[in-house]
Every structure is written in C-alpha cells, then in structure tokens.
C-alpha cells in the first residue's frame, strides 16, 4: 500500500522466501519483511530497495533491478525486482506492485553480457574521442 505495508503475498512468494501469507501480510516491506524475515546482505541494498519501492508508489516504474535476500532457511536468493504503481478505479495511486523474477544462470549470464556490451561501447566511444583529439593537431601540422 502507500505506506509500504504488504497487502498481497502469493504462493510463489511463499515458496521463494519460505514465509507464508499469514506471517507476512500487514507487515512493513522495508525493515520487517526485507531486512527482518528475509535478511539482506547490507544496509546499502535495503536503501536501494526503499528508493525503488517509493519510486513505484510515486508512479515511476522500475524493471529488472538485481536484488538478493536470504530465505527462511538462510539460502541466498537472487532475483530481478520489477515495481509498478498500483491504482484504484479512479486512477489514484494507492500503492505499488512488486514482482520478483528468479535469476537463472542463463539469464544472469546474458545480463553479464549486456553489461560487458555497455562497457565495450563506452570504451569505443572514448577511443573514438581520443583518436579525433589526436588527429586535429596532426592535421594542423600537416598543412603548415
């Protein structure tokens, strides 16, 4: 809801986290559920989750944000978090839907390749800029 309390918890979330619906609904997502029941690796990830959650509550959707937590048995679970605004029948924002997609090795690998592609493109742009900056003085020398 608009106060970051959990109002829905489906069976898939129960299987993923180890916590059942009756244990979770009504609790605060930040601090109680994630950070309490489902431990996080650090305060930094809790802060990032809080920002994403409140962005969703304010109408800014987020897709496939890498997120991880420890389930009830202490196993680390890696997921991709998608947050979308939740509206009533009048279109007024009344909260946020959060969806978790488990990261399978193939998906994780392809996300790694996407990151490498972005880094390669960035390096290519930088090298193109350096090349152009070197050519300008050389062109000046050539014409004198």
Image: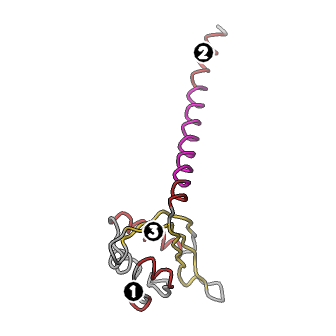
Label count reads: 3
Which is nearer the N-term, disc 3 or disc 1? 1
Name the residue at 53% across, 79% down: 96
> How many other residues sit within 10 Å of disc 1, few (<14), some (14-19) or many (≥20)?
some
Q: Secondary structure at mark 1?
A: loop
> How many other residues sit within 10 Å of disc 3, few (<14), some (14-19) or many (≥20)?
few
Instruction: Using the image, tell me which numbered label, if any, was put on residue 27.
Output: 1
The magenta stretch is: 110-132
- In the rendered view of the protein, which quadrant contains the C terminus? top right
Relative to 18, is 42 above or below? above
Task: Give the Cα distance between marks 3 and 1.
Answer: 18 Å
> How many other residues sit within 10 Å of disc 2, few (<14), some (14-19) or many (≥20)?
few
Q: Is residue 109 magenta?
A: no
Name the residue at 48% across, 62% down: 66
Which residue appears farthest toward the bottom when viewing the image? 22
Instruction: Using the image, tell me which numbered label, if any, was put on residue 51.
Output: 3
Q: Secondary structure at mark 3?
A: helix
User: What colouring does the structure picture have?
Assistant: secondary structure
Task: Give the Cα distance between marks 3 and 2.
Answer: 49 Å
Mark 2, residue position: 138
Which is nearer the N-term, disc 2 or disc 1? 1
Relative image position of residue 103 (x, y in whole percent): 50, 64
Relative image position of residue 134 (x, y in whole percent): 57, 22
């Amino acid at each position: 809801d608009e106060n970051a309390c959990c109002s829905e918890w489906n069976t898939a979330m129960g299987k993923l986290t180890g916590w059942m619906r009756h244990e979770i609904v009504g609790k605060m997502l930040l601090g109680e559920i994630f950070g309490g029941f489902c431990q996080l690796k650090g305060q930094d990830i809790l802060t990032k989750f809080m920002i994403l959650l409140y962005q969703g509550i304010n109408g800014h959707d987020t897709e496939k944000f890498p997120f991880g937590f420890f389930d009830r048995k202490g196993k680390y679970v890696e997921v991709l978090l998608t947050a979308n605004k939740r509206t009533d029948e009048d279109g007024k924002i009344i909260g946020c839907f959060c969806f978790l997609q488990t990261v399978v090795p193939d998906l994780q690998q392809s996300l790694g390749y996407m990151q490498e592609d972005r880094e390669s493109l960035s390096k290519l742009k930088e090298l193109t800029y350096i090349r152009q900056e070197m050519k300008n003085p050389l062109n000046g020398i050539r014409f004198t």
